[in-house]
Amino acid sequence: MLSVRAMALGYRSIVAVRGIDLDVGAGELVAVIGANGAGKTTSLKGIAGALPVRAGSIVLDGEDITRLPVHERVRRGLSLVPEGRGIFARLTVAENLDMGAYLRRDAAGVLADLDRSYTLFPRLGERRRQLAGTLSGGEQQMLAIARALMGRPRLLLLDEPSMGLAPLVTQRIFDTIRSIAAERVSILLVEQNARAALELAARAYVLEGGCITLAGAAGELLSSDAVRRAYLGE
Ligand SMILES: Nc1ncnc2c1ncn2[C@@H]1O[C@H](COP(=O)(O)OP(=O)(O)OP(=O)(O)O)[C@@H](O)[C@H]1O
Ligand SMILES: [Mg+2]
């Protein structure tokens, strides 16, 4: 579904990502783990089109999307839930969810998906008229994911969905990610919480200093000495 080849990008004089290769198969849940500053967010920005790549290519379902603007990628089924969530604080929960469907023309389908959001996240249903800026951190994360799903993505890019959340809320978010994946939405999950990400994903990549240093089945990485020492605190 997604093939990234030799992708390099950065900020002015900084090269943050140095030619990475990465694949996500149809319906596959793939994790990227790495320390602060490793280039995880930058990689997702490149794939989503929020930051231009300097070298390499991004292919989605056989189509080269390397130079397409963000909205053209969204139209093709690619959706990013950014670090820090990016919800509209002054809009209500329901209005935020509507924004997520802005490219869609099937009103009935949008309504059905709105119901589905509230089934997936009952808390959002209870708070549909509440301003998003007044939601708790966990609720805002739920809203960000639900809003992305309103665009009916085929590939969801999630940047640190557990950031700043209590363990129980994190568990709830991860359960939801699992159920989204079960509906055949491909997921590329970036996480600091390496153990949880590796337990959730089928495959994973380790990013260090802008390079992929390890890749493989998530279960194998979980039991690898290098990963255990560097990322699982053992
Ligand atoms: N807007 C920016 N301008 C300049 N440098 C940046 C910018 N954003 C990120 N960087 C640098 O690029 C490198 C990679 O940053 P990135 O945000 O991709 O890391 P990350 O792996 O997502 O880290 P974290 O786990 O802390 O979110 C870092 O060295 C960072 O300082
Ligand atoms: Mg980041």
Image (cartoon, rainbow, N blue to C red):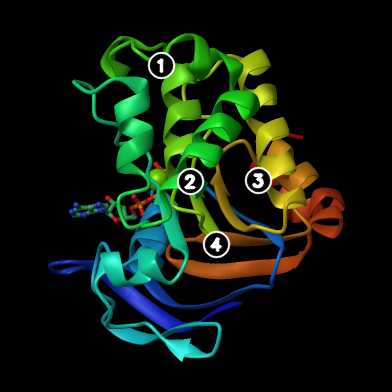
Disc 1, SS: loop
Q: Residues within 10 Å of mark 2 (few under 14, many from 20)?
A: few
Looking at the image, which residue is at 79% across and 43% down? 199
Q: Residues within 10 Å of mark 3 (few under 14, many from 20)?
A: few
Q: Which mark is residue 128?
A: 1
Question: In x, y percent, where is residue 132?
Answer: 31, 19
| Marks 1 & 2, CB-CB < 8 Å contact | no
- Depth check, mark 1 against mark 3: the one in front is 1
- Depth check, mark 1 against mark 4: the one in front is 1
Q: Which mark is residue 141?
A: none
Sequence-wise first label, 1 or 2: 2
Mark 2–mark 4 Cα distance, whole angstroms, equals 22 Å
- Depth check, mark 3 against mark 2: the one in front is 2
Sequence-wise first label, 3 or 2: 2
Q: Find out if the beta carbon at label 1 lies less than 8 Å from the nearest ligand 2 atom.
A: no
Sequence-wise first label, 2 or 4: 2
* Residue 63 drawn above or below residue 133: below
Q: Residues within 10 Å of mark 4 (few under 14, many from 20)?
A: many
| Circle 2 residue | 108
Is residue 76 at least partly visible in the picture?
yes
| Circle 4 residue | 155
Amino acid under label 2? Ala
| Circle 3 residue | 230
Amino acid under label 3? Ala
Looking at the image, which residue is at 46% across and 89% down? 63
Sequence-wise first label, 1 or 4: 1
